[in-house]
Image: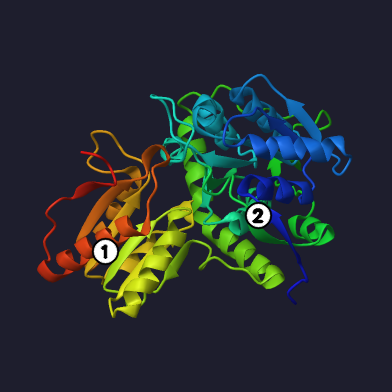
Amino acid sequence: MAIIEQKTIPLNGDEAVAYAVKQSDVDVVAAYPITPQTIIVERFSEYVANGEVDTEFVCVESEHSALAASLTASLTGARAFTATASAGLALMHEMVYVTAGCRAPVVMAVTNRALSAPINIHCDHSDVMAERDSGWIQLWAENAQEVYDSIIQAFRIAEHPDLMTPVMVNLDGFFLSHTLENVQVLPDNVVRKFVGIRQYPLVSDTQGKKVPFKLDPDFPLTMGPLDLPDYYFEHKRQQEEAMHIAPKIIKQVHDEYAKLSGRSYGNGFVDAYNVDDAEIVTVCLGSTAGTTKTVVDQLRSKGIKAGVLRVRTLRPLPVEDIMRALENKKAVAVLDRSNSVGGQGGPFFHEIRHVLYGAQSHPPIVDYVYGLGGRDMPPALIQNIYKDLEEIAKTGKVKNLVQFAGVRE
């Protein structure tokens, strides 16, 4: 498959989401505005008003309703999208679980923002970390280009008939959502062909007849009914089984898109930068990877074997990829843009540390909680973290398992 000729246009991260959705032949977008996500649905509403898309745009009274409308549209067979952030995602919490439990392949962009209180409109990852166990696939973007590419891939992944699982695409609030970048975009017809027409798995109705898995008067089905102990456990187990086959589908879609666009993000699950021969490695999510890669280049120029591992797919957690990348290192630091209050470190740290428990070699691992409420993570702070890792690598000892980088103590 030849790489398709593309054009470069200036887009911020939110606009990159809206542009990708515009190209993806979406039937229903349900929306409620919240900073720093608002640009996504504002821009998409302009596409609707201008007649650039044939999409039903539903303005609702809350984020809970936005996901409820997207869910019900998806269950009727429509391709559905919504977007939110922070308290909006928290208000959706019930429907986040319902959407996954109904196996509705909704795609949602989450512009990551801190949760209150105190009220804060800036970036951290506390909003989406609260949804890790909900049954959604989670993709994380480093820049606006990856935001655009990931949204397009998300529709293919979510709607795969063997998967039927909703997908969140995460982008850092303001750092990505409001920062203008050059983004290469594919032609509309190429994206539409790549995303394709939604296919439905066949299920057995009450008469034993195979019918499409969607709400259709011609083939009556019930979705999301009362599910008592006789069946609830089995349905939750089915969601787990879907997550086990998700990596194959994510990989297939990522690689096919790479051949089309010329862009890939590691292996689709982790993006390893100078990790193979590294002795000290940081692990991060989202836009912080860009700054960290610059610091790694500076350290490498001084002969320090540093690397950074960016996790792109947090759900399903790429256990084997993370383990292979980190198990023989001399010291590892997790950069956590959220905190588990009273939980000895942040939630991302808990994820990475538990993966390494199963490794043959257990490198010393530390957590650095940083950037809460949008606090900057400048290169100097990252350099200090690598200095700490150098000391840990020499001594093999961790003095402070959890530290808070850039905070006034």
Between 103 and 155, the one nearer to me in the picture: 155
Secondary structure under tag 1 reads helix
Q: Residues within 10 Å of mark 1 (few under 14, many from 20)?
A: many
Q: Quadrant of the N terminus?
A: bottom right
Q: Mark 1 points at which residue?
A: 386
Q: Quadrant of residue 203?
A: top right
Residue 147, placed above or below residue 213: below
Amino acid under disc 1: Tyr
Label count reads 2
Q: Which of 333 and 370 is in front in this view?
A: 370
Q: Where is residue 9 in the image (x, y as percent from the top left)?
A: 73, 58
- Residue 145 makes an appearance in the image: yes
Above or below residue 300? Residue 78 is above
C-beta proximity under 8 Å, tags 1 and 2: no
Q: In this view, does 396 lie above or below 224?
A: below
Residue 77 can be seen in this image = no
The outermost residue toward the right is 51
Expressed as whole percent of the image width and height from the top left, the position of residue 398 reads 14, 57
Label 2 sits on what residue type? Tyr
Q: Position of residue 125 (x, y in %)?
A: 43, 41
Q: Would you say 45 lies left or right of 297 here?
A: right
In the picture, the disc for residue 148 is 2
With 403 as the anchor, is 334 left or right in this view? right
Instruction: Relative to 104, say whether 229 is above or below.
Output: above
